[in-house]
Amino acid sequence: MGQLLGKNFLTLKDFTPDEIIYLLDLAADLKDKKKNRIPHKLCEGKNIALIFEKTSTRTRCSFEVAGYDLGMGVTYLDPKSSQIGKKESIADTARVLGRMFDGIEYRGFGQEIVEKLAKYSGVPVWNGLTNEYHPTQMLADMLTVRERFGKLKGLKLVYMGDARYNMGNSYMITCAKLGLDFVACAPKAYFPDQKLIDECQEFAKESGATLSFEEDVMVATKDADIICTDVWVSMGEPEEVWKERIDALLPYQVNMKAVDNAKDTAIFMHCLPAFHDLETEIGREIHEKYGLTEMEVTDEVFEKYADVVFDEAENRMHTIKAVIAATLSEEI
Ligand code: CP
Ligand code: NVA
């Protein structure tokens, strides 16, 4: 027990399959406790800092609610109001926060920033999303998949869209670690970086996973168990990339044709936020400029699988709670 005590959570590359499954089991147990109103203040008296250099709904709320449920104090640092990066270096910030807090969450830009925080703070650091990886999202997704299918190994997961960024990279790593068959379905230019593919092929050898990269939507989605996607333009990317993304990725929109080509039992997943209608400011701007009414997923697909997608959102909290407890609590 206590196998992950004191450990950072920066990318799932750093975790063995057994450790990932341990976190999923712990999350399932904590979810059960929460549903049954069984107190689980496993980190009573500890304090955590949440640094957000990019905006968030799910990740911030998950860390806050999880922190309170575990009996901790929680301090939120928003994208503008701290000295981080502007007046104070990451190394200095880390050394200050490490004196006051028992753990630090970071959401922001390059992976090297969260690595530096971990190096200098002396306390566990959790990656709440960087340009490269979104590991807490992966635990939520895998818990949701396991709840639906009762297993992970051997399932075929197809990621459609920009497979070079945090979500595509993270799905490839997670599938490779846990023995799912991963397919990146995108134009060639949007496939993950070859160096990461090579690393993941090594994980796949151990787990029995397969990794494939496919431009043809009908080939990719055939017999899929899980189809997932993400926004075409991520936080921090310049507005100018919208046109190129729409041109390249519109054929990879998750629509009923793609879903109907998958298994009858298939599910659709999305980390959210999603552009599936015109109920957002950006959605309306894109509509005015390019005439699209829905982007990475059609409204029809989104609403058909809304119960899965919102289970996935809820599971962010239970899985993040597991990460905090596993790395900070002496009681488990
Ligand atoms: N999926 C996710 O990370 O959502 P937020 O950006 O709202 O945290
Ligand atoms: N790729 C998206 C994920 C949001 C949860 C982004 O980085 O904005």
Image: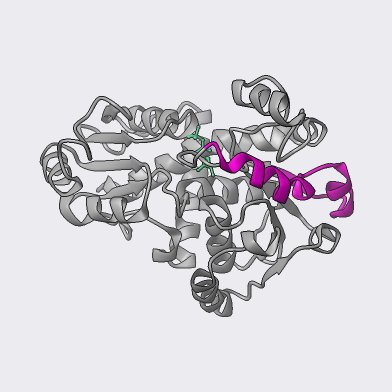
**Location of residue 239 in the rendering, given as x and y in whole percent from the top left corner:** 54, 36
Residue 284 image position (x, y, % from top left) = 67, 22
Q: Position of residue 140 (x, y in %)?
A: 54, 45
Left or right of 252 in this view: 196:
left
Q: In which quarter of the image is residue 295?
A: top right
- The quarter of the rendered structure image containing the N terminus is bottom left
> Quick check: 187 above or below 85?
below
- Residue 101 in the image: above or below residue 293: below
Depth check, front residue: 69 or 311: 311
Please state which of residues 161 and 245 is positioned toward the viewer in this rendering.
Answer: 245
Residue 40 higher or lower than 180, as above or below: above
Please name the residue shown 88% across and 53% down the image: 261
Q: Is residue 26 left or right of residue 155?
A: left
The image shows residue 271 at horizontal and vertical percentages of 59, 40
Q: Residue at the spot x=36%, y=54% of the render?
A: 111
In which image quadrant can residue 42 be found?
top left
124 and 25: which is toward the camera:
124
The magenta segment is 239-268
Judge from the rendering whether residue 74 lies leftward or rightward of residue 245; answer left or right: left
